[in-house]
Amino acid sequence: MMNLSILAAKAENNAIGKNNGLIWHLPADLRHFRDLTTGSTVIMGRKTFESIGKALPNRDNIVITRQTDYQAPGCEVVHSLEEAVQISSQEENVFIIGGGEIYRQAMELVGTLYITEVHGTFDGDTYFPEINPQIWEETFREDHQANEKNPYDFSFVTYQRKNN
């Protein structure tokens, strides 16, 4: 049985990126991301792949693009979220890791949201969809204070889809 989840870091105003890059540098969040996804499958859009710059090691990487001749070394290239989910359906843990348009499409499909909430508002051009409390229940929260390596307060939060 596949566990299909979203993994994202978002600001209080739901900003997740600007100019195809991250808006903040939080080493603790990067470590959290690596710990959750290593050994699993990650699904991302083309722009997210290009912002990372390479296939993520120790993971099966799937890149979604409308470009029929797109090349992503070390990744499987598909042309829809549905196709990405289909080819990873035999995997145990599959994480959708961005970007904004892929998150919007995936919100109806996933059962879990792993969200790093960065406590602050940021200027962005890409945003995470609203997390509707009628649909999602917070099941875990771990708060962290800013420190010498992580310049913002942040929380690791898990949401589970409610069974309505």
Image (cartoon, grey):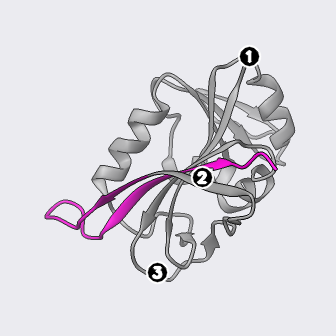
Q: Which residue is mark 3?
A: 122
User: Depth check: 139 or 58 in front?
Assistant: 139
Q: Which stretch did the figure color magenta?
A: 141-164
Relative horizontal placement of residue 63, taking residue 81 as reference (left or right): left
Relative horizontal placement of residue 73, taking residue 79 as reference (left or right): left
Q: Is 58 a magenta residue?
A: no
Relative horizontal placement of residue 64, taking residue 51 as reference (left or right): right
Badge 1 or badge 3: first in the primary sequence: 1
Q: CA distance from mark 3 to mark 2?
A: 19 Å
Q: Is residue 38 above or below residue 24?
A: above
User: Depth check: 67 or 39 in front?
Assistant: 39
Expressed as whole percent of the image width and height from the top left, the position of residue 28 reads: 29, 51
Secondary element under disc 3, as helix, strand or loop, is loop
Residue 127 falls in which quadrant of the image? Answer: bottom right
Expressed as whole percent of the image width and height from the top left, the position of residue 92 reads: 63, 20
Q: Is 143 a magenta residue?
A: yes
Q: Is residue 81 above or below residue 153?
A: above
Q: Which residue is mark 2?
A: 48
User: Depth check: 30 or 155 in front?
Assistant: 155
Q: Which residue is mark 1?
A: 90
Secondary element under disc 1, as helix, strand or loop, is loop
Give me the residue at 78% from left, 34% from top.
84
Type of amino acid at the residue the image marks with label 2 = Thr
Relative horizontal placement of residue 14, taking residue 43 as reference (left or right): left
Badge 1 or badge 2: first in the primary sequence: 2
Residue 83 falls in which quadrant of the image? Answer: top right
Q: Nearer the viewer, mark 3 or mark 2?
A: 3
The reply to whether the C-beta atoms of the residues labelled 3 and 2 are less than 8 Å apart is no
Residue, far left: 148
